[in-house]
Image (cartoon, rainbow, N blue to C red):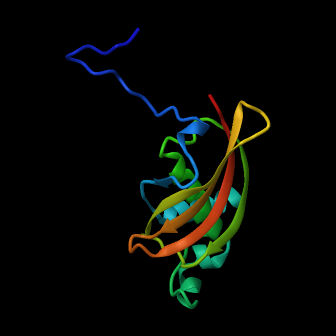
Amino acid sequence: MTNATPLAPAIKGAPDHYWDALETGDKLRSPGLTITEAHLVNWAGLTGDWVSLHLDAQYAEQTAFGQRICHGPLTLSAALGLMTQTGYFTHVVAWLGLDAVRATKPVLIGDTIRVEAEVTLARETKKPEHGVWSLGYTVFNQHDEVVMNFTSSFLIERR
């Protein structure tokens, strides 16, 4: 039964993508996120990472950055989270890991980050109900400067 009529289109919800929705070479782009002081403070509270470079404005002014910067793992986690907003990660069975993480430029309070990811591997597994995606992530700031890159792999349900 469908809810579509000639006058009213079908109601659509969140995308329902499985492993076969992406193949090697496909590219995804996330929405953006503006990093705020609240992100830094909440990350520090959540993780116990109370380093002065991130939380002490007077200390950070004396560093090479001249101001507080975002925690690297916060940038990484935000990038993974932003990519889930594309709708392609609704059938993740397991996160398999992370490789080759490089922070290439600091993320400052007020910077807006976004992510582009390329599927570097889409392969079947021995189990017909699962496949693997490996993606190369590139995180950009609002000036289109690369601030981080890494690869991440996921076990995904197949139809």
Q: Locate residue 82, reporting x and y percent.
A: 51, 53
For the residue pair 33 and 118, the one nearer the viewer reads as 118
For the residue pair 75 and 133, the one nearer the viewer reads as 133
**Outermost residue toward the top in this view:** 1
Q: Quadrant of residue 50?
A: bottom right
Position of residue 40 in the picture relative to residue 100 (left or right): left
Question: Is residue 48 something one can see in this rendering?
Answer: no
For the residue pair 147 and 150, the one nearer the viewer reads as 150
Q: Locate residue 96, reporting x and y percent.
A: 74, 50
Position of residue 33 in the picture relative to residue 78 (left or right): left
Q: Locate residue 145, reporting x and y percent.
A: 45, 76
**Outermost residue toward the right in this view:** 126
For the residue pair 73 and 132, the one nearer the viewer reads as 132
Q: Quadrant of residue 46?
A: bottom right
Q: Quadrant of the N terminus?
A: top left
Q: Quadrant of the C terminus?
A: top right
Residue drawn 64% across the image and 73% down it: 102
